Image: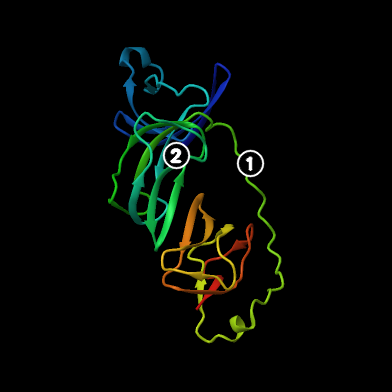
Amino acid sequence: MKKFKFKINGSEYEVLINEIEQNIAEIEVNGTPFTVEIEKQDKASSMNRKAAGKVAAIKTPSRSVVANAIKAPLPGNVMKILVSNGQNVKRGDVLLTMESMKMENNILAEHDGIIRHIHVQQGQSVMQDDLLIDFEGTEAEIPVAQAPKAEVKETPRQESAPAAASSAYAKPMRSPLPGSILKVAVSAGQHVKRGDLLLTLESMKMENSIYAEKNGIVRKIHVQPGQAVMQDDVLLDIE
C-alpha cells in the first residue's frame, strides 16, 4: 500500500494505492474507492529509464463532498426506510430503522447530504457491515470534534419503595451494548405493559430503544440520563 497527499486548487486529497494488477489499480481518494486504468508508456519514450505506469486522470470529488457508504452496524432486519433516492437530508435525520437484538435502532445521518442509492428494502435481513445506503455528504471534510469520554462516577443508589428492595421476583434488565443513556422514560413504581418504551440508549451513533418484554412494575432504576454504561450493566429492575 502506498500513500500520497495532493493539493489541488487549495483542496487537499489523500490517495491510497491499495493494489495494482496488470494495468488496473484499486485506489482510495479521501476514503472513496476508485478503480483506475493505468496507461502504459510507449517504449520509444522510455529508452533510458524504466517503464513507469501513469495513472489516468481521476475525477476528484468537489470540495467538502465525499461519498459515504452507510453500513449495518449490527445484524438485524430493516423495519422502516424513511428516505428516498435523491433526497436531501440534514445531520441527525433518521434514515432507516433496524430491529436488532430485540431493540429498535435508528440509523442517523452523520452530516448534511444527499441519498444517492438505497440498497435494502423493508423486511430485508442484513448482516453486520452489509451496505445500506450510498450517501453523499457535504460536510465530510469538516472534522467533527469527539466529545471527551465522560468520567463515570459511582453515584449512591437511591432506594425506592420498600417493596422494591424486598421483592424477590424483580428481573434485572441489562444493557445489550455499551453506550450512553439518552432518556429514561419510566419511573420507579410505574406499571408498564409489554412493548412500552423504558429508556433510550445511544450506542455506535445509533439511538436504541429499550422496551419492556412483558407486563410488570418498574421496581428500581439504576441509571440516569447522560450516564455511560457497559454491556451487561443493570439498567433497571422489573417485577
Residue 236 against residue 170 in the figure, above or below: above
The secondary element bearing badge 1 is classed as loop
Residue 157 picture quarter: bottom right
Amino acid type at circle 1 is: Ala
Label 1 CA crowd tier, 10 Å (few <14, some 14–19, many 20+): few
Q: How is the image coloured?
A: rainbow
Which residue corresponds to mark 2? Answer: 1
Name the spot of residue 121 as percent of width and height, x first.
28, 44
Q: Nearer the viewer, residue 230 or 236?
A: 236
Question: Could you tell me which residue is drawn at 43 percent across and 53 percent down?
Answer: 105
Amino acid type at circle 2 is: Met
Q: Which mark is residue 111?
A: none
Residue 144 against residue 123 in the figure, above or below: above
The secondary element bearing badge 2 is classed as loop
Name the spot of residue 154 as percent of width and height, x first.
70, 69
Query: Which quadrant does the N terminus fall into?
Result: top left
Q: How many numbered marks, from 0 up?
A: 2
Q: Which mark is residue 145?
A: 1
